[in-house]
Image (spheres, grey):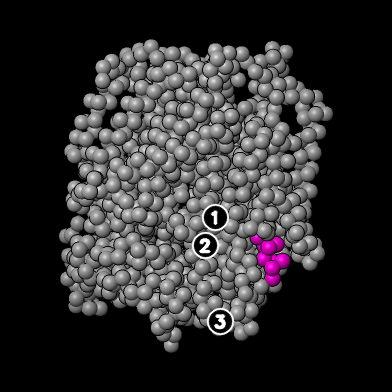
Amino acid sequence: MNNLDRTELGFIAALPLLIACGLLLPQWIVNYIHVSLGTGLVALGVMVQMRAGLVSFGQGLYFCIGGYAAGLAGRLWGLSDFFLLIALGIAAGLVVSFLLGFLLRRYRRIFYAMLSLAVSMILFGLLSSSEELGSTDGFNLPATSYLGWLPGQSVSGDVLYVATCIPTVICAILLHRFLRSPMGYVGEALRENEIRIEYLGMSARKAVHIIYVIAAVVSSIGGVLWAMALGHIDPEMTNWVTSAQFVFIAILSGIGNVAAPLFGTLLLEFIRVYAVEIAPDSWHIIVGSVMLLIIVFLPRGLWSLVSSNNGLKNKFTHRVKAASEPEGARS
Amino acid sequence: MKNALRKILVGSALGAVALSVPLAAQAQEPVKVGVINFYSGGASGPFGIPAKNAAEVIIEGINAGTIPAPYNSVGIAGARIEPIYVDENSKQKVADFKKLVQGDGAQIVIGYTSSGSCKAIAPVAEEVKALTIFAVCGTPQIFEEVVTEPKYAFRTISHATSDNVGAARYIIDTTPDLASISGINQNYAWGQDSWRDFSAAISKLKEDVEVKTEQFPKIFAGQYGSEISALLTNKSDVVHSSLWGGDMEAFILQGGGRGLFDNSKVVLTVGDTAVERFGKQIADGTVIGARGPYGLLAPDNALNKWFTEAYVARFGAQPVGPSYQTAQALLALKAAADKAGSVAPEDISAALAGLTFEAPSGTIQMALAGGHQAIAGITYGTYKFDEAVGKGTLVDLKEYPAECVNPPAGVKGTEWIEGGLQGAKCN
Amino acid sequence: MLPMLTAIAIIVDGLGFSAWLFLSSVGLTLIYGVMRILNIAHGGFYALGAYSAAWSIGLYSQTGSTIALTFLLIPVAALVAGVVSGLLIERGILRFMYGKDEILMVLVTYAIFLVLEDVTKLIWGTDSYVAYQPAFYFGSIDVLGIPYTVYRFIVIGVAAVVGAALWWALNYTRSGKLLMVVIEDREVSASLGINVTLFFTVTFVVGAVLGAFGGAVAAPEISVTPGIGAEIIVLAFAVIVIGGMGSVGGAMIGAIIVGFARAFSVHVYPPAELFSIYLVMAVVLAFRPYGLFALAEGRKI
């Protein structure tokens, strides 16, 4: 574990902090943090693809596959083990994304978005019309156990929260490593100019395929964690509206750092909660206006606030900023 | 305030018991009650807003003590209700619920329209020990599978089984030469369950009824041209539909324009909301239900009279099914709290289990699931346009008592229907 | 082999549904073609058009005058709703955003859509509006014994006329030809002295009016409720993606494919109706990755 960079150190430092929050803050706030960790991982999956210029409007597909893998294991075989369910979620996401990747890797830009949306909506249709799987009402998960230990009801929430924090942080660190690996930089280059990559002798399609699978696995883990936190799953998880929210979180948070989507998810969750509190009938106006203001004043996302305030002039984030300008002007 | 005082005096004149309660009301802290429904999205018009309107009318009535007997005391067990409205249209329903209970301090929560929400919330309600009264959602699974030994979760309406068993009975009773049925229901849990219950009940009640076509359009599809053609080409005696709200209205317009309603007898299990506004556009002979004895199908009692008048005076529209259902849940809360003389969730739960109480829709018995699930009768009627008044009316009303359309305690709805509706008491 | 009656029903139903789909999605493809904005607020325009038509027809019908004039109210309501909202949004918000990333623009229009939805709700409330008078005015005619409303055939005709008019305007008028230049290359056309900003404004407003018109035409046959805008967005996306984004002809073909796919599944295998559209989209894209009539795009090295 040598050569850890600032982000990784930050994450490792954040873990005890996150756990402390869980034990000290009022439980209802912890609840939002808890569910945001799951959805945050999916937003992270969207963000990883976005780094390569690919926008998935169907990431809910893997969110749902993770959730249903965990849920069905409980429903069919009575499985409730935390580690086993995560492993199942990873396996399901891996298999499906590896196969679908052969189709998706041929697409770019809005067509990638629409095809991923179409695939996720086909799953939505199948789940919604299958009465055996609970149709649109979905079904509940059994309480989570850990290697044979089933915590009592008074502590089960806290235990699950701590158990959720750890894989989230691990996923974030691994993704950060991936983005800094040669393959990660190929993704960057994909967004910039795909043809140049091919001239350099690399396969753009293969790179897209790898990124697609990685994003899918992270999202599946997010789905498993979210399903365990909520205790209930339904096909809404793979509805395009859900997927769109992940895209919006990723864009609003910014793609400069893997921490951004995790923070962004939480922040937007609280904006929504308070918007609902202020105007239960017309909170969409508030959320929509906040989104517009962020786009207008922080076009590189909320993370640009953090990175500039800290004076964190990471060479990498700097490059991303510089790159995003000509990107838009080019079209 | 003055008004409230006068009501207290009236109340005390009516009964000696009532006296001590209103006096306590001045001293007690208000009770926070979460009221959750769809306040945005496609379900807000037909469900959420009418439910919220009813909640406002009833809560105001409870706080002022203006509701007729037996609810003519101020507050619940003397405490005023302070409502907190939360939108059900949210991805994080469970977190929202916990915030309501733990963050905002609402120990009592009323509402929920989607069966999916109810399934997700029921175990959480038990976990955080918040009295939760489901007001609108219909799936029988809540107490049959999700929470089998409820302590804090209640539902004050019958589950959806009774809607469709009632519809099947009405069709059998009014269509002597029934030979074929078809269905058009939305492709989600509610539509699928409704059609399954209805078609199964028909097949048990009468032999050799043929099913011609089963249509499952997407929810909120709005365009039913193809489905109507399919229903017209596969002509059947009866067409069953559990479409609701805008979808149901669009179906009436598109089907009506093409003679579907003259070709077949159409049963609209949630058709009540259309009666007021459509007039001639609904063909005579269409069978209309409301998921309970609500609106035009409601009994003629003092509570209903008060409720309808207060609602119309305030919102200029008739209360619909979800309004009645929400009123029912709030009155159940008041009845139980008054009986317990306390607003602690445990005390109210103990009092509400197995309670029989009055509502604008008649008498409700908390009979199933250890006294946590209500059973109530259901009424269906046939549409007739009244040329003289220029308005639609319902004729040939048939009221089916609770024991006639609900399974006995301990039996699941689907098993009860499949087993031939054993033990139904219809008169 | 399909029975004759079912085959005829599929054709008529498919055409009827396709016409509505085309009217509801052509504005979206026009805006994308010219401005490269995938306009989610399109759903908001659709809802605004539907509400203003249903509301005005309702008000007019109360006067008891002849129903025939309500057919005039439909385009007028769409025009007013589309021009007002389109101008406000383009001049007030979008023009400050031009040149931004395509995906960011999707997000901007999504935010606008959220606001529009609630504004619609604040203006018209949550009660549904029904304005069936025009739909019932001409009654119905039988096609091989199946009654169809005449209104449905009028909608099919209107869709054909709108498609033809757009095609003519784009290919045979001076402004249309200039617009094609703008579509081909924005920078070159600006340097040739074409007022690109004006073209953008006009295109957006026309797109908004078309979106509102789709809603207004549908209004007499449906119940206008909150949320109808959200339903149309994905349908319209599917249509224009299948046809090739930015192509008016493609939108027509896409609408016909989606319309027939739905009619076919309803008559032959109803449970598939829920995802037939997405299945068709996936299949078409699997063979034609950029839709049937994709706009040519230069490769930039």
Find numbered disc 1 in the image and state the secondary structure of the residue it sits on: loop
- Circles 2 and 3, Cβ within 8 Å, touching? The answer is no
What number of labels is visible? 3
In the picture shown, does residue A321 fall above or below B68? Answer: above
User: Which label's residue is closer to the chain start, 2 or 3?
Assistant: 2
Image position, residue A184 (x, y; %)? 43, 21
Q: Which residues are magenta?
A: B227-235
Q: Which of these two is toward me, A299 or A75? A: A75
Q: Residue at x 19, y 34 (%)?
A: A20
Instruction: Give the image quarter of residue C102.
Output: top right
Find residue A195 and name its label.
none
Up/down of B114 relative to B365, above or below: above
What is the three-letter code of the residue carrying label 3?
Lys
Using a 10 Å C-alpha cutoff, classify the residue at mark 2 as few (fewer than 14 neighbours), some (14 to 19) or many (20 or more).
many
Q: Given the image, on which type of amino acid does mark 2 rest? A: Gly
**Looking at the image, do the residues carrying marks 1 and 2 touch, with CB atoms under 8 Å apart?**
yes
| A158 on left or right of B200 | left
Residue labelled with disc 2? B191
The residues bearing labels 1 and 2 have C-alpha atoms spaced at a distance of: 9 Å
Foreground of the two, C25 or B277: C25
Q: How far is mark 3 from mark 1, CA to CA?
A: 30 Å
Q: Position of residue B186 (x, y in %)?
A: 55, 59
Taking the image as drawn, is residue B25 in sight? no
Image check: C2 left or right of A16? Answer: right
**Residue assigned mark 3:** B206
Residue A96 seen from this side: yes
Name the outermost residue toward the right: C172
Query: Is B83 a magenta residue?
Result: no
SS label for mark 2: helix
Q: Which residue is mark 1?
A: B219
